Image (tube, grey):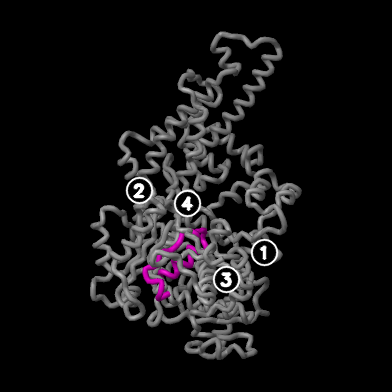
Amino acid sequence: MMRHRCRSYLRPSQPQSHVASALTLLLIGALLSSPSLPASNTHGAGPLLALAQSASQFLGDAASQEAEALVKAWSEAYGLWGESVLPPSAISLPPGVPAAPHLEDCARVSAEREAAERRGAGGEEPSWTQGAPRRAEAAAAGAGAAAAAAAACSGQEHGEGVPQPPWIRGPDAANLPLTRVVQRDIWRHQFPLGDCTDKRLLIAKWPTPGGHGAGSQVHVMSAMLSLAMLNNRVLVEDPDSYLRARTADCEAAAVGHNSRWDCYFFPITSVECRRVAVQQLITNTLPECAGVRFEEAAASDAKFVCVGMANSMESSAASLWGDAYLNTTCTVEAEGRLMPLAPELRKVHWWRAQAVRFIMRWPSAHLCHVTNQERHRAFGTLSANHVARFLQTQSEALSALSHSISASPGTATAAANAGATPAGANGTAAATDWEARRRTAADRLVALAASFLSFHPDPYATPTATAASDHSASLSGDAAAAAAAAAAAGANGGEGGSGDNGNDAGWSMLVQEPYMPRPIASLHVRGTDKFAEMGLSSLDSHIFHMTRLRPHALHLQHVWLNTETQANIDQVKELASWTFFYSSNARQQDGGGGLRQYERDQSVAVSFASVLIAAQCDLFVGSLGSNWSRLMNELRSTNGRLLAGFVAVNFGEW
């Protein structure tokens, strides 16, 4: 049984990117184009030719200049220049400039994420807590064809369905056992119905930075969450205890509240529960939190308990879901073999991964903006080059598509152009009917082409009439009219449209990931003062282990590097067989003051942005004796990358 469970799963994950999905249009052009047929400005061809000309006007001749122009336009539109710590309220792109595949519209996605967790006016839970509806139920409720199709595609056609927390990606098999159920249950526990005055609270003080790195702090808080759930208490952070948020940027981003976790990530509990906890702290009805271990206060019948310490290995809450943690697939490799964990360590890893995923489920708007800055610095030029090439091939495909639509054999138009007359009334009626259907198909293709050329912020969502009108200035004549008409039909719930927002439900920005060059490996090289806790491995040793990944991904070349040592950055610049990307934080020189000093000197937001980018990589190499590597391992275990595997340089010190 163990041998079966530990078979090799090391393979890169392959999430879709914005640009790759748009190749659908190119496939349509390839299927329909026929070079031998003459072009004609019949219905559908004129708009498509206009769209192609609109794309060509933007393209020009020099791809490098186009890419450079894209990078600059994106920098300005996404607010990546200047001193702002928050994203712009709306992304305003110049006509013809596409949305950046490697960036997020942070204001928009943050609003969507807040809405996804909001209860209804009557206290109803969000729909994702109940799971996807069965197809028959969706149809009976009049949800529309698109919503019914989305329900069918979810695979939940029988029973209540598995809950669908929008921050979890990938199929269940690519996540730790019961991940979606556990995330729903933690959310319910931490966001109870009502004003929270009837709830028992555990008010937790974040460990001080002097004794804990940022990763260690998160693991201590995961232990606090375990203790809170075991004792039927809602976990609330002491609002003034997260000292790593005591920065000018956090103060500006949080409007004066600069010592809270939600400077960087979404709150871990409801506003109502936080309000009750703050009131207790203000009225001094609680003893001093610092130094109080939960075990000392567990026997208390007090409604409110304040805690300042906990064993970070605490994971007893895992038992609330039975022995699911025992079914964890072995995906950590060390010394050339997959390493099974002892049952108790499986329990710790399973719970930590679940708690860390919830605590870090969404970046705040501020951290999203900082992550955009890091992505743009690392991937902006590469992304622009891909987009410029895509636009060029798309323009060619649109021209070919206009030919195939305007000159298809068997149509009344083609027959008229050839000087022939359809035979008999029946032939005329059939040709007219065929022509009508051809025009409908052409309208849809025009709308599809317009949706990509006008670059609606979410390329998977059905373009709305508003979006089409916003971008109509970048199109001309028939193209703009056709795009607006087709988009309006979709917005009104016409055939193939999504007036019920069913298409957004299937391809929401909540479940998309920004572009990165793939496959890409995450590499974490820990150094400096960590030698006091674990044996340190050289960069060369890490590179050796990373090279062993290439049989699983022969074209692996790109690496996202996390390290606090400048010598490692200098060394990787000399490695021609790899392309390394890394964050903008300055690194320590040899003999620096250790991680604590490094974290005080650098941006905590950039460090968190770096670990979020690392968690979206395809393959992983790191030192599991480090809390930072553990965070990456835990995050990848609950975002659809469990089966991608993790190569541990020092597994024995986990």
The amino acid marked with disc number 1 is Glu
On whether residue 378 falls in the magenta region, the answer is no
Going from N to C along the chain, the mark reached first, 3 or 2, is: 3
Q: Nearer the viewer, residue 449 or 2?
A: 2
Which residue is disc 1 drawn over? 125
Which residue is disc 3 drawn over? 326
Spot occupied by residue 35 in the image (x, y as percentages of width and height): 46, 22
Magenta highlight range: 628-654
Quadrant location, the C terminus: bottom left
Q: Residue at x 63, y 72 (%)?
A: 321
Which type of secondary structure does the marked residue at label 3 adopt?
helix
Going from N to C along the chain, the mark reached first, 2 or 1, is: 1
Residue 586, image quadrant: bottom left
Going from N to C along the chain, the mark reached first, 1 or 3, is: 1
Going from N to C along the chain, the mark reached first, 4 or 2, is: 4
Q: Is residue 104 visible?
A: no
